[in-house]
Image (cartoon, rainbow, N blue to C red):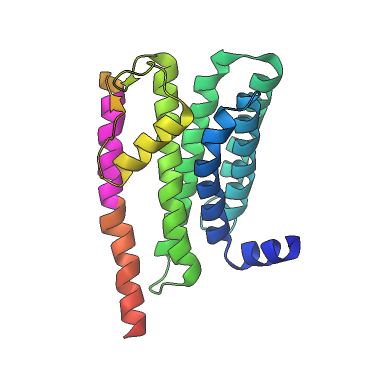
């Protein structure tokens, strides 16, 4: 089983990264209800950081930048778990947002460096979308940490969980609407507006280009 996973993760690293991120989206609601929720979330977050750093090595992006960011983030997360220092949350999430945006940019450069579309590049398009969604989720986490009432939902507590903010991020990035969770503060709305713009530009610029190359190759 491990041999099978390693083989496919090496052949299609973008697909492996995408599947791990989707697994995280599905597992986070269960981990948030666990007894040691923060530890479970941080451990899984560290796993994704390591996999993403390995992915950046295959792109035109500079590996040392992603590796340096990942190292600092892991130290901050470890301190949060060991010392219970909630004040580090805005710093770790802010750096995680930067990390995921840099990884997404590296994957976009990887997809745009030639005029043909491979299977891995199609998976890279999906992985980039989730990286952007995760990056903006961390921006929302920072916003909420600095302004606890930045997001709200009718009849529910003011503080939103990671899953809540991740759902909001996917809804905004795909331009399908904000759902039940609403950005209330001006800063939260500004980030939400920026994410909607990025989502439209990504789908119109990057994904459309890949589809055009796929059609051209088959023709």
* Position in image of residue 81 (x %, y %): 67, 22
Reply yes or no: does residue 191 show up in magenta.
yes
Quadrant for the N terminus, please. Answer: bottom right
Residue 76 placement, left or right of 180: right
Residue 5 placement, left or right of 217: right
Which of the 4 quarters of the picture holds residue 38? top right
- Outermost residue toward the bottom in this view: 219
Number of marks drawn:
0
Q: Nearer the viewer, residue 116 or 214?
A: 214
Q: Nearer the viewer, residue 87 or 5?
A: 5
Which of the 4 quarters of the picture holds residue 198? top left
Residue 92 visible in the displayed image: yes
Overall secondary structure of the magenta section: helix
Q: Is residue 168 above or below residue 83?
A: below
Q: Which region of the structure is painted magenta?
A: 188-201
* Position in image of residue 19 (x %, y %): 54, 54
Q: Is residue 121 above or below residue 173?
A: below
* Position in image of residue 90 (x %, y %): 49, 21
The residue lying at 25 percent from left, 39 percent from top is: 177
Reply yes or no: does residue 170 show up in magenta.
no
Q: Is residue 192 above or below residue 100?
A: above
The residue lying at 50 percent from left, 49 percent from top is: 22
Quadrant for the C terminus, please. Answer: bottom left
The residue lying at 46 percent from left, 33 percent from top is: 163
* Position in image of residue 127 (x %, y %): 47, 54
- Outermost residue toward the front in this view: 155
Residue 109 visible in the displayed image: no
The residue lying at 36 percent from left, 81 percent from top is: 217
Q: Is residue 170 above or below residue 183?
A: below
């Amino acid at each position: 089983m491990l041999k099978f996973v390693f083989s496919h993760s090496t052949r299609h690293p973008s697909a492996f990264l995408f599947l791990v991120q989707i697994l995280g989206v599905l597992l986070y609601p269960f981990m948030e209800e666990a007894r040691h929720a923060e530890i479970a979330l941080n451990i899984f977050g560290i796993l994704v950081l390591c996999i993403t750093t390995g992915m950046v090595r295959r792109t035109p992006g500079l590996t040392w930048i992603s590796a340096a960011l990942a190292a600092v983030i892991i130290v901050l997360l470890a301190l949060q778990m060991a010392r219970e220092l909630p004040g580090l949350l805005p710093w770790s999430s802010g750096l995680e947002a930067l990390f995921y945006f840099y990884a997404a940019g590296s994957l976009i450069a990887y997809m745009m460096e030639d005029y043909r579309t491979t299977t891995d590049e199609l998976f890279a398009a999906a992985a980039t979308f989730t990286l952007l969604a995760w990056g903006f989720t961390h921006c929302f986490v920072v916003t909420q940490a600095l302004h606890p009432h930045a997001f709200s939902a009718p009849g529910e507590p003011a503080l939103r969980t990671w899953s809540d903010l991740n759902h909001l991020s996917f809804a905004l990035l795909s331009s399908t609407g904000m759902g039940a969770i609403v950005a209330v503060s001006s800063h939260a709305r500004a980030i939400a507006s920026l994410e909607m713009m990025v989502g439209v530009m990504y789908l119109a610029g990057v994904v459309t280009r890949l589809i055009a190359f796929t059609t051209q190759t088959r023709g």
